[in-house]
């Protein structure tokens, strides 16, 4: 097996990673300590369900207020709380769906037709509202629980992991679906905080997550969410170049314009996540560069009424206000197109926005290499709630030069230096030269590679083949929006029923389908928002005030209902699509990757934001299923994702190439699945063919 070149390459890269592990701390980047802020206030407006989803994703849940003492803690806060009314008109807390034994309603509240609760600031009284109204919201973050039950270590581990599911539609006992684990103690503060909790125990000691495994002591909690994402690491190592896939070069677009409407805070968060920040305009020359652009800029007024730029919170020494601007009660700045003048507005108004992407900075300070590395890494934090010096929380690093364009661009910058040369991120480590930035964000997730390799199965859990179950039925009550979100997260979407034949396939199924009524009273399918050309309504349906569709069992007729009601639901999983358009291999690849975005708030063309790719054929069943699809093509063969790159055959989706009879030195570098001979064949990548796209998990 070690004679196989891809395996040797992979092993070499793993060895390099092991050497890197020598300098990484043993705790993953996601660990932020046990003593976390109890309550987190989010000023961005969301409906109750989206607020709940955000709190559950990043913290624990929307806040639970258990008594008057806790209620007073929220006197100055406002927004959604975790209280909702269930289908039996019982008020419950989102956290574990507990019945609310304490409430503090304002006079006249709650109103009978409003199912979710919020509070205004400067009051301890609560109000009800439609769950689809927009409010700020408050999250709780309960990180440490003392369980006063006597159990063995294994029983204690299972108990913790069964407390709550990460994906609420699956049991917590499903693989890596637990939100809790036996405690990990990393810092002195963790130790002291846990010790304080442990003093309430009924036994002399309490179990921790420390266990002796594979000849060493390990914490059983190994980066939780990261475990789910690491299973395809080995396969990725076969095809990744020496620099990680996330690397996109130094010379990036300076300014990125987003037409989607967001409030200022959400726009800032998007820019910071994907680029650098909202734009900073430093002088009149830069201002003229934005004459045709419009939307939020990075200017805001702080608590001292000082206008500052979002980027490093610098005081704004240059401004270009329109006459009569800024208005005293408006704290954020935007501009219209075809003008160089700015206006103020409420930070919670919706505008398009402009991001900057400053990727390369020359620092004119004389430092040693180590000092220069530390300086770069301290420039700005990735997670703004933590210092940039926190483990792997830096957004900058010493420069990496991968391409000729990187070299030339950096050389141009370096000519402004006050020293003869400038430091780069190239360093001799573990008997070879390496760039200190190894795979950027991926390096943050690699810290437990060796431990993971001990327990991971040899085949990745994420790849399950092309022939997936066409329709998935959920025995779980959700409103239409939550059902749609679940289907989109784990499959493709709520089901689309295109004709009577498909409708008969659902005769025995029941629940929400993907049909909804848009703002123009047009019925559409959730999948790509296509107009519904086929419907099968029950007599008297649809009703004018109900905007979502479901079906009862043992019938092929549909009914309308309020989208906020709860029903079972039906998901579709369309994994393989035949595109009957003639394109070159590159055009076909781009077409597949533009079909649908993974992050719906960004275009599918944004880097690594595609949900589809050119087809990968791993198993015999994949091959047969794809061949069946390909027989409907209008060309003799269809493009696949197999390509000859860097002296080896690779699937563009990153899967391992299993085929043994591929030429080692091909004259044609792309591969078609031939629907007449039933074989794959190398072809010139510039030929135009139909092609197959598949949906990636």
Image (spheres, rainbow, N blue to C red):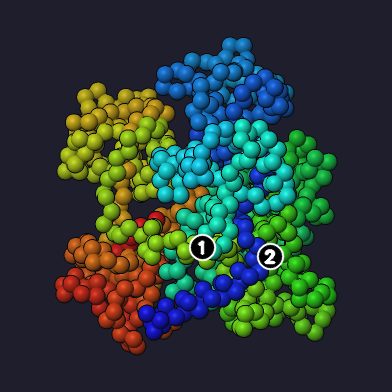
The CA span between labels 2 and 1 is 36 Å
From the viewer's perspective, is residue 359 above or below residue 695?
below
The image quadrant that residue 474 belongs to is top left
The residue labelled by disc 1 is 214
Disc 2 vs disc 1: which is toward the camera?
1
Q: Position of residue 360 (x, y in %)?
A: 69, 70
Q: Residue at x 76, y 38 (%)?
A: 327
Residue found at x 79% / y 54%: 314
Is residue 44 in view from this perspective?
Answer: no
Outermost residue toward the top? 108
Q: Quadrant of the C terminus?
A: bottom left
Mark 2 and mark 1 residues within 8 Å of each other at the beta carbon: no
Which class describes the residues within 10 Å of circle 2: few (<14), some (14-19), or many (20+)?
A: many
Tell which of 634 and 554 is nearer to you.
Answer: 554
Please name the residue shown 51% across and 49% down the image: 601
Secondary structure found at label 2: loop
Q: Quadrant of the N terminus?
A: bottom left
Q: Which residue is mark 2?
A: 396
């Amino acid at each position: 097996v070690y004679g196989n070149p891809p395996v040797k390459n992979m092993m070499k890269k793993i060895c390099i990673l092991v050497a890197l592990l020598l300098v990484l701390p043993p705790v993953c980047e996601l660990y932020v300590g046990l003593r976390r802020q109890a309550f987190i206030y989010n000023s961005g407006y969301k409906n109750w369900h989206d607020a709940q989803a955000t709190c559950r994703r990043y913290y624990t849940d929307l806040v639970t207020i258990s008594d008057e003492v806790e209620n007073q803690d929220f006197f100055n806060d406002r927004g959604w709380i975790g209280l909702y009314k269930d289908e039996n008109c019982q008020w419950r807390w989102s956290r574990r769906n507990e019945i609310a034994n304490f409430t503090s309603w304002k006079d006249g509240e709650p109103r009978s037709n409003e199912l979710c609760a919020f509070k205004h600031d400067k009051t301890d009284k609560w109000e009800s509202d439609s769950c689809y109204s927009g409010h700020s919201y408050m999250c709780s973050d309960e990180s440490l629980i003392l369980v006063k039950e006597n159990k063995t270590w294994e029983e204690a581990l299972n108990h913790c992991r069964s407390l709550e599911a990460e994906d609420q539609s699956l049991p917590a006992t499903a693989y890596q679906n637990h939100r809790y684990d036996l405690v990990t103690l990393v810092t002195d503060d963790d130790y002291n905080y846990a010790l304080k909790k442990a003093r309430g125990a009924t036994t002399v000691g309490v179990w921790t997550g420390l266990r002796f495994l594979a000849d060493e002591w390990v914490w059983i909690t190994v980066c939780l969410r990261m475990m789910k994402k690491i299973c395809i690491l080995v396969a990725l190592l076969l095809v990744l170049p020496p620099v990680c896939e996330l690397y996109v070069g130094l010379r990036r677009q300076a300014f990125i314009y987003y037409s989607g409407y967001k409030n200022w805070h959400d726009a800032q968060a998007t820019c910071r996540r994907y680029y650098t920040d909202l734009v900073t305009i430093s002088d009149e020359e830069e201002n003229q560069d934005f004459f045709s652009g419009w939307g939020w800029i990075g200017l805001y007024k702080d608590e001292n009424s000082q206008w500052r730029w979002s980027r490093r919170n610098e005081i704004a020494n240059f401004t270009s206000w329109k006459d009569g601007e800024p208005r005293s009660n408006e704290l954020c700045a935007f501009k219209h197109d075809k003008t160089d003048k700015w206006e103020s507005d409420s930070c919670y108004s919706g505008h398009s926005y402009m991001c900057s992407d400053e990727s390369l900075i020359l620092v004119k300070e004389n430092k040693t290499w180590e000092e220069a590395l530390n300086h770069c890494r301290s420039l700005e934090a990735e997670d703004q709630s933590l210092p940039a010096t926190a483990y792997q929380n830096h957004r900058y690093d010493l420069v990496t030069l991968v391409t000729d364009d990187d070299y030339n661009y950096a050389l141009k910058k370096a000519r402004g230096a006050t020293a003869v040369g400038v430091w780069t991120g190239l360093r001799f480590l573990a008997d070879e030269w390496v760039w200190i930035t190894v795979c950027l964000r991926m390096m943050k997730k690699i810290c437990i590679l060796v431990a993971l390799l001990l327990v991971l199965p040899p085949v990745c859990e994420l790849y399950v083949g092309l022939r997936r179950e066409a329709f998935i039925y959920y025995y779980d009550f959700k409103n239409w929006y939550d059902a749609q979100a679940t289907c989109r997260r784990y499959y493709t979407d709520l089901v689309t029923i295109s004709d009577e034949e498909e409708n008969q396939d659902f005769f025995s199924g029941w629940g929400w389908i993907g049909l909804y009524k848009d703002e123009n009273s047009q019925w559409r399918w959730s999948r790509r928002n296509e107009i519904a050309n086929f419907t099968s309504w029950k007599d008297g349906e649809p009703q004018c005030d109900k905007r979502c569709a479901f079906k009862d069992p043992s019938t092929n007729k549909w009914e309308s209902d309020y989208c906020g009601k709860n029903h079972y639901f039906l998901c579709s999983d369309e994994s393989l699509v035949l595109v009957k358009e003639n394109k070159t291999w590159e055009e076909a690849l781009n077409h597949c990757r533009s079909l649908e975005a993974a992050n719906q708030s960004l275009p599918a063309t944004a880097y690594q934001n595609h949900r589809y790719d050119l087809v990968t054929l791993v198993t015999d069943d994949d091959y047969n299923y794809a061949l069946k699809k390909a027989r409907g093509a209008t060309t003799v063969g269809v493009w696949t994702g197999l390509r000859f790159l860097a002296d080896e055959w690779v699937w563009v989706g990153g899967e391992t190439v299993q085929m043994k009879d591929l030429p080692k030195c091909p004259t044609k570098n792309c591969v078609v699945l031939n629907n007449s001979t039933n074989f794959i064949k190398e072809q010139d990548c510039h030929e135009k063919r139909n092609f197959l796209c598949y949906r990636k998990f």
